[in-house]
Image (cartoon, grey):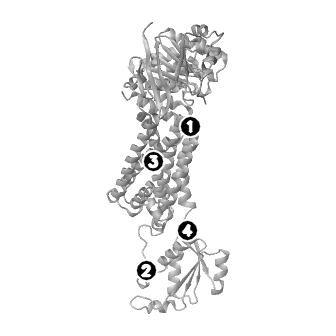
Amino acid sequence: MNEVVISVRNLTKCFGNFTAVNNISFDVLRGEIFGFLGANGAGKTTAMRMLCGLSFPTSGSGSVAGFDVMKEGEQIKQHIGYMSQRFSLYNDLTVGENIQLFAGIYNLSKAQTEQRSCQLLERLNFSSERNTLVGALPLGWKQKLSFAIANIHEPKVVFLDEPTGGVDPLTRRQFWELIYETAEKGTTIFVTTHYMDEAEYCSRVSIMVDGEVRALDTPRNLKREFAAESMDEVFRVIARGAKRCD
Amino acid sequence: MGFSNFFAFVKKESLHIIRDTRTMLIVMCIPILLMVLFGFAISTEVNNVNVAVVAPNRTDGVEEAVDKMARNNYFSFIGYIDNSEIDKYLRSGKVGAVVVFDKDFDRYLAHSLNGIPVKPIIQIIVDASNVNTAGSATLYLQNVLLDKASQQMLFETRLLFNPQMKSAYNFVPGIMGLVFILVCAMMTSVSIVREKEVGTMEVLLVSPVRPFKIIFAKMIPYFLISCIVLILILLLARYLLDVPMSGGVGGIFLLSLLYLVLSLSLGLLISTIAETQVAALLISAMVMMMPILMLSGMLFPIENLPTFFQVVSNIVPARWYIDAIRKMMIQGLSLLDVWKNCLILAGMTLMLIVVSLKKFNDKLE
């Protein structure tokens, strides 16, 4: 389990005079649930976009799933999954059609598509909903489906951008069970969140402030280091000095 | 990377359109509505104009001329009236035009000098409250009355290509120029911007599908729908409005396909500018529609525009398209005869595609 899946060295992104991401370095291992925290405007999204091959770093280096973020953005895209807070499926397509679309996007064969969609629907207990329009599903179900579909091509890393925004606590709980299950199979989870109780579930947590990674460790070590009761307290202590926010 | 993901997208886009029945109906109905509206309701052509005649002497010559007019479908002969009643009839709207024959009509007709009557022998009094109708009624009335004896007129007017001055002939190319921009540009831009707004575009961009594939997959179903609309319009034009299409349907169809592609690329360009669906809608409806209505020659002849707008009209694609379609539909020119228009439209299409793809890619960074 010590294979490095994401490796980042001195990654920097500037927009004009503004340094959105300043010289960050970290490694994420296979099967880890890596919590990527930071206040709004701290540079989380920019960093994540670079890792997803959507934006080129100004300097520094990094690799995701064995591909260079500078040169191999297209290969990276083939080997990662992505799910954002904003709902990422099509409401006017059925559950089955959404699955097929994303299977098609990742060039899965017909047999693979059929096998994986059955698997996926069974795991979520959705088998009876195959022909339901996604728009008719409750939000919690949609999020779970969205996560499952982000995994349809069995990517090495799944990026989750505030995946549980606006979801009730019970569903969030179920959602995290799904994340654990996936991580146990060896998929690396890279997740941003604003919920500090979710930060407690992560294997390791990094906290970004003003474009820099200010802390990176397991939740337990962080709490000890900052003599805090909870991750919430840790976060507040670290983010107190932030100059940027929106 | 194979084509399978491309087809997955085409399928998805088609499903979006099919599921959205309301939009689909609107897209199909707007062209039909416009065609019927412009073809029948809003017309400047002469149709059933009531005509009264004042003739002091009902000679053979007069009777013959009146008879010819009465038999014409475009005029209804009300009857002979007295000189003093002209004003009353016109004011009350009972008639749209009054034809007054000279009391010596026959004699002057016979004594014409080298085929030219020595003085005017027919007076046409027209209700000009609707300038367009009045103008065409006058011209057509002149044509009908003196058609056989045209050598006896002071000048000879011959209306080529559209002798009845049917307005449908004029409007059909205009409607085509308008509808395709509406259907293609508006629908594609709104559908692309919708994905930006909802957030699905983000997911697609993180996927290994190249952006241009996403875009082209979006265009294909709209292109097909537009083709159906095109066929519908051509059928309506030919069989409902009797537009001649003397230049050959094939050429009209080909040129229209080029115009469809142009409209689609315009939609793509709009989608790179607009951030919200409403903005996309406004840009395509207002910014596109106004120039098409005003500067394309659809409603007003370009020659009548102030010089400044004449120059501006050159960059309105609809101008070149409508001009070419009019020539092919009514004048009977072939596609080769309008090569200049084709070339300009092709150039514009290419430019639009290049600019919008570039803008689209820049946006991603």
The disc label shown at residue B148, or none: 2
Numbered circles on residues, count:
4
- Residue at point 55%, 50% (across, down): B285
The disc label shown at residue B263, or none: 3
Residue B66 vs residue B322, the one in the foreground: B322
Q: Label 1: which residue?
A: B20
- Residue at point 41%, 34% (across, down): B213
How far apart marks 1 and 2 lie (CA) works out to 58 Å
Element type where label 1 sits in the image: loop
What's the residue type where badge 4 is placed?
Asn
How far apart marks 4 and 3 lie (CA) works out to 35 Å
What's the residue type where badge 3 is placed?
Ser
Which mark sits nearer the N-terminus, 1 or 2? 1
What's the residue type where badge 1 is placed?
Asp
The relative height of residue B63 versus residue B133 in the rendered view (above or below) is: below
Residue A121 vs residue B247, the one in the foreground: A121
Q: Chain of mark 1?
A: B
Q: Where does the image place residue B69, in percent across and percent down from the top left?
A: 52, 76
Local packing at callout 4 (Cα closer than 10 Å; few below 14, some 14-19, many 20+) is some
Element type where label 3 sits in the image: helix
Horizontal side of residue A222 vs B214, given as left or right: right
Q: Label 4: which residue?
A: B47
Which mark sits nearer the N-terminus, 2 or 3? 2
Is mark 2 in CB contact (under 8 Å) with mark 4? no
How far apart marks 1 and 4 lie (CA) works out to 41 Å
